[in-house]
Image: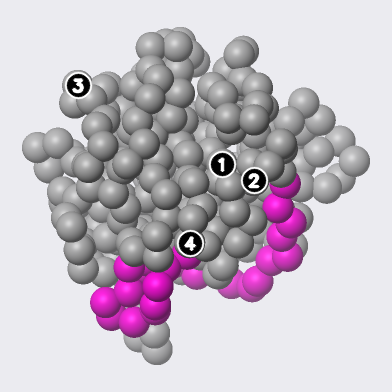
Amino acid sequence: MRTQAFDYHALRVVCATPEQPYSFTKGSAMGWFAKGSGVLGALALAACGGGGGGDALADPTPVEQCASIGVVPKIRGGTECALPGQTPVVVFIATRSNGTALYCSGTLISPTRILTAAHCLPPEVTRITTPVWQADGTARELRARSWVNHPEYQQTSAGFLNDAAVITLTNPLPAPPMPLLVSNPSTAGQNVFIAGWGGPDFELAAGFAKVTIVNDLHVGYVYDNKGANTCPGDSGGPMYRAIGGTQGVVGITSSGTSGDCGAGDVSLFTNIQTPKVLDFIRANAPDAVVF
């Protein structure tokens, strides 16, 4: 996730950090860059975290940004750490039949189901794993039982259409799920949070943005070096905002027009409030909470 700076007032806040760096590549289709897909180095991760919640603000503090996904900012040199198992924003590894892997983000929308982007799960994927955080800060693998892409997912010159997928895990994750927000329509001018495990640092991070694009296919904005922006590895992660103190997913990180996530990048998120997308999610995650 790209931001202007990294200090206490940074617009994108590190909430957890991988134990070791990864090497990633960025995919593209017809001029649109996927916000995910990278080559994986390892699955063992270590991080810091905590708890909380709150509504989106024009300029939320680091605590408020990380609290929006149920964790606290990383304390550099500190000792008070908790695991990112407390957040619904997850990372997963999708392994292809040839042994290469994709690294993407997702949102836990029920104890056993992850909402993510369809472009993270091409047909050649044969195995998906996500970390389950341990008390010592390491992680063990939890495998997916099945996964399904939206049947009308496609790559076009207008970006990825119906870029949504649902992963079903073999066992529940202990993190609290994030519900789907459908009762309050997305409109231009709304302040939202975005979160994911993407670049440039490939760490769990949360930031904020202002919506300027809303249509039946997408919600999004044009990044102008204000607020935060999604980058490779953030694909599948949530755009979300709060109603009555409850955070709810309104978009799925999908694509952009700039490979470096910089100024002028048109960042698009699958609009989950569109009936075609919402019906798909509810059919494949019937236990997801909708409000």
Taking the image as shown, residue 184 lies to the left or right of residue 23, namely left
| C-alpha separation, residue under disc 1 versus residue under disc 3 | 25 Å
Tell me the kind of residue under disc 4.
Answer: Ala
Question: What percent of the width, then of the height, locates residue 80?
Answer: 31, 78
Residue carrying label 2: 33
Instruction: Judge the density around disc 3: few (<14), some (14-19), many (≥20) Cα neighbours within 10 Å.
Output: few
- Mark positioned earlier in the residue sequence (1 or 2): 2
Callout 2 amino acid:
Phe
Instruction: Read off the magenta span.
Output: 1-27
Alpha carbon of mark 3 to alpha carbon of mark 2: how far? Answer: 31 Å
On screen, 283 above or below 199?
A: above
In this orientation, does residue 132 appear? Answer: no
Distance from disc 2 to disc 4, alpha carbons, whole Å, reads 15 Å
* Mark positioned earlier in the residue sequence (3 or 4): 3
Magenta: main secondary structure equals loop
SS class of the residue under badge 2?
strand
Q: Which of 146 and 251 is in front in this view?
A: 251
CB of mark 1 within 8 Å of CB of mark 2?
yes
**Residue for point 45% across, 37% down:** 269
Q: Is residue 285 left or right of residue 9?
A: right
Q: Are marks 2 and 4 in contact (CB under 8 Å)?
A: no
Foreground mark, 3 or 4?
A: 4
Identity of the residue drawn at 51% across and 53% down: 265
